Image: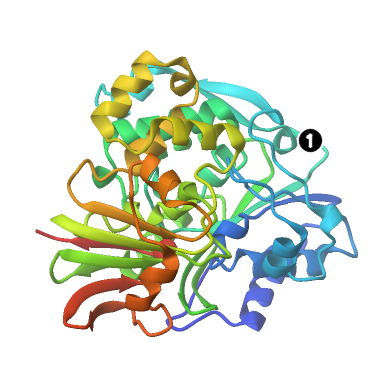
Amino acid sequence: MILTSEKTITGDGLRKALEEFLEGKNPRKVLLLPPDYTRLYSGAGRITAALYDILKGSCHIDIMPALGTHEPMTREECEAFFGKEIPFESIIVHNWRTDIVKIGEVPAEFVSEVSEGLVNEKIDVEVNKLIMDKSYDLIISIGQVVPHEVVGMANYSKNIFVGCGGSSMINSSHMLGAFYGMERIMGRDFSPVRKVFDYAQEHFLSDIPLTYILTVTTNEGDETFIHGLYIGKERKLFESAVELSRKINLVHTERPFSKAVVYLDPREFKSTWLGNKAIYRTRMAMADGGELIILAPGVSKFGEDAENDRLIRKYGYVGRERILELTAANDDLKNNLSVAAHLIHGSSDGRFNITYCTEKLSGEEVAGAGFGYIPYSEAIKKYDPLKLKDGFNTVNGEEFFYISNPALGLWVFDK
C-alpha cells in the first residue's frame, strides 16, 4: 500500500490506511517496533498510537522502541511521542548488549564483494529475541525513510538490524559504512551496508510475520507533515519511499557554505552521538576552510551509554586516519567499532572547523573531544534561533546558512 500527499496525509487518512491494512488479519499478539524519541518528526509516534487504538480491544500488544544504542525513553518522552493513551508499562526496553540472539551470518565473501574489498570479515546477524518469538503473529516495524550517514537511506530493515539489533551487527555495519565513506553513501540506496541488511532479511527473516510501515516527512517548527506512507514488506515499497525522500529531504545548495549554523532541538539531541547529524548532513555542502557552528543547548554528554561516552572522551574526534590507527592499537576501540565509526563520521578531517555551543558540557570537555567551543549563551546573542530562518541569513553583515533541524535533510553542493 502506498499513500502520498503533496501537503500532508491527514489523521483521518492515516487511520483509514491502517485500518485497511489490518482488515481481516485478526492477530492475537502484536509487537510494534517504532523508533524512539530521537525520531521526533517521523510521524511514527502518531502511527503507533493509532495502531494501538485500533488493536487494543482485540489482542495483546507489546511496544518496543528501536533504540539501537540510544538510551531508553523516559515516561515523559513516551507521552510526548506516543500520546497518553499508550500505557508506559506496555513499553519494552531493547538492550543492544544483552537482549539479542544470533540468527545467522553474512559471509565474508559477500561483505568483501559489496565493500569493494575494504572489509573482508563475516558479519553476525543479531536481533532482539522478541523478533524471533513465535508467539507473535504480527510484527510491525514503523519508521521514517530519510538520508542517513551509515546506511545511505534510513529505515526499512535497518530498524530491525540496528534499531533492534545487537552489538556485533551494529559495530560491523557502522564500520563498514565508515570504511566505504559517507560521501559515497548518504542519500543513496544500495550502499554496502544496505546490501548486507538486504542479505540478512532475505536469508534470516523471510519466515517472520513482519510488515513495515514507512514514512517520508518534513516539518515546520513542531508540526510534522507526512508526505508518504508505505505499508508492506516488499523492497519496492522502500525504494518508492527512497525516491520521494530524495526529492524532498535532499537539498542541493547553490553554493558551498563558508559558514553554517545548525540548531539542535534540546528535546531530541542530548548527546554528540545524536547531535553530530549537524556534521554528517552538512559536510557535503561545507566549503573547505569553512566554519560549522552547532547550537546545542540540550547536549550534556557524548555517548548514549556510559561505555560509548567514555570512549569518545578518551579518543576524541581526531580524524579518519588517526582513528584507524587507534583502533588497530587499542582493544577497547577494536571491540566497539560503532564508536570508532562514529568518531570518524564526527570529524571534518581538518577540511572545515566545527564549534559546539553548549551549556551542559564545559568548554574543557568540548575541546577535549576535538571541537571548538563557544558558550551557548554567548552564541545565541549573534545566532538567535528565534530570529533566524532556514537558508541563507545575514546578521551584522555576516552571511551564513541556517538549519533548524538537521535530522530531516541532507545538504549537498554539486561541484
Residue 174 to residue 235: above or below: above
Give the percent coordinates (x, y) of residue 363. 41, 51
- Amino acid type at circle 1 is Lys
**Quadrant containing the N terminus in the rendered view:** bottom right
Residue 218 to residue 310: above or below: below
Q: Nearer the viewer, residue 402 or 412?
A: 402
Residue of label 1: 134
Q: Nearer the viewer, residue 229 or 297?
A: 297
Q: Nearer the viewer, residue 58 or 405?
A: 405
Residue 41 to residue 276: above or below: below
Residue appearing at x 41%, y 40% in the figure: 194
Give the percent coordinates (x, y) of residue 131. 70, 38
Label 1 environment density (alpha carbons within 10 Å; few <14, some 14–19, many ≥20): few
Determine whether, in the image, residue 149 is placed left or right of residue 15. Answer: left
State the image quarter where residue 355 is shown. Answer: bottom left
Give the percent coordinates (x, y) of residue 159. 56, 46
Residue appearing at x 50%, y 81% in the figure: 8
What sort of colour scheme is used for the picture? rainbow
Q: Most extreme residue toward the left, as rendered?
A: 415
Determine whether, in the image, residue 353 is placed left or right of residue 170. Answer: left
> Can residue 79 be seen here?
yes
> Can residue 196 be seen here?
no
| Element type at mark 1 | loop
Residue appearing at x 50%, y 61% in the figure: 359
**Quadrant containing the C terminus in the rendered view:** bottom left
Give the percent coordinates (x, y) of residue 274. 48, 51
Determine whether, in the image, residue 327 is placed left or right of residue 199. Answer: left
Residue appearing at x 49%, y 20% in the figure: 332
State the image quarter where residue 161 is shown. Answer: top right
